[in-house]
Amino acid sequence: MTPDLDALADAIRSKHADKGRILVAIVGAPASGKSTLSDRLYHHLGGDKAGAAVVPMDGFHFDNGILEERGLLARKGAPETFDVGGLKRTLMALRDTPNDDVYVPLFDRTLEISRGSARVIAPDHKIILVEGNYLLLDQSPWSELHDLFDLSIYLDVPEDTLRSRLIARWRSYGFDDATATHKATSNDLPNAQTVIEGTTIADMSVRID
């Protein structure tokens, strides 16, 4: 099923009508299509000129050096490999200081690092689409984020579809079939299961087959 952009945009605009700025969580497992949906919604809402902006959770990855020190590099992308406190402080700044510029990090997949202050969220950005795997995860410290969102959208994708997409993603990075399958099944799919099994009920759910 293709997401109904009109319905999603209408729900977002309805929430925005009563507030100066809203934060919208777009949640799903790895390879569920969060980034694609966020980008499509961003443009459907009118983009930057209409006051929309996207904040990806991936920008809050811990640096590889920290992950190595903690023995977590092989689990990069799991809930414990993100700076949840930094994400929370950024979301609170977006909510509580709407008249200030707020700078957010972006994850560079080519370099496998986060680039700090890579995107500015300006006062005229009123609809903030926050996309990520664990924004609605029902475990601490992620659960501290839930009340910061005005609206949440969950992408419901079958595990078999996620598996195929994840293997294809690693292949696209130049890995052979065996390596791509190992990377997908050893880390990405366990993370996907964490999202599927541990996400609280969202305001809206979009089924994608």
Image (cartoon, grey):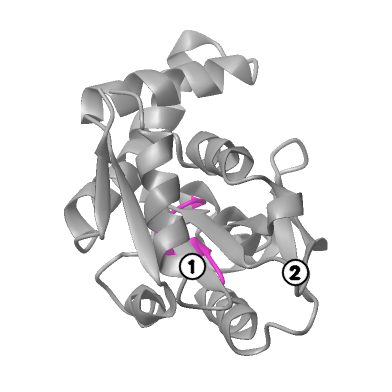
Provide the secondary structure element on which disc 1 rests: helix
Q: In the image, which disc is placed on residue 124?
A: 2
Q: Is residue 187 visible?
A: no
The quadrant the C terminus occupies is: top left
SS of the residue under disc 2: loop
Question: What residue is drawn where x is 47% and y is 69%?
Answer: 17
Residue 107 counted in the magenta span:
no
Label 2 crowd bin: few (<14), some (14–19), many (20+), radius 10 Å: some
Q: Residue at x 58, y 46 (%)?
A: 45
Does 119 sit above or below residue 18?
Answer: above
Give x and y (percent) for residue 111.
Answer: 77, 41
Prevailing SS of the magenta stretch: loop
The residue where tag 1 is placed is 16
Amino acid type of disc 2?
Asp
**Whole-percent x, y for residue 23 in the image:** 50, 68
Residue at 28% x, 39% y: name it: 206
Q: Is residue 134 visible?
A: yes
Above or below, comparing residue 107 to residue 100 in the picture: above
Q: Specify start and end residues of the magenta stretch as a single range.
A: 76-83
Using the image, tell me which numbered label, if any, was put on residue 57.
none
Dot placed on the residue nearer the N-terminal end, 1 or 2: 1
Which quadrant holds the N terminus? top left
For the residues labelled 1 and 2, the Cα–Cα distance comes to 13 Å
Residue 125 in the image, given as x and y percentages of width and height: 70, 65
Q: Nearer the viewer, residue 207 or 47?
A: 47
Please give left or right for residue 110 compared with residue 30 in the image.
right
Using the image as rendered, state which of residue 170 and residue 150 is in the foreground: 150
**What type is the residue that disc 1 sits on?**
His
* Among the 4 quarters of the image, the one containing residue 184: top left
Q: Is residue 94 left or right of residue 196?
A: right
Question: Residue placed at 54% from the left, 57% from the top?
Answer: 129
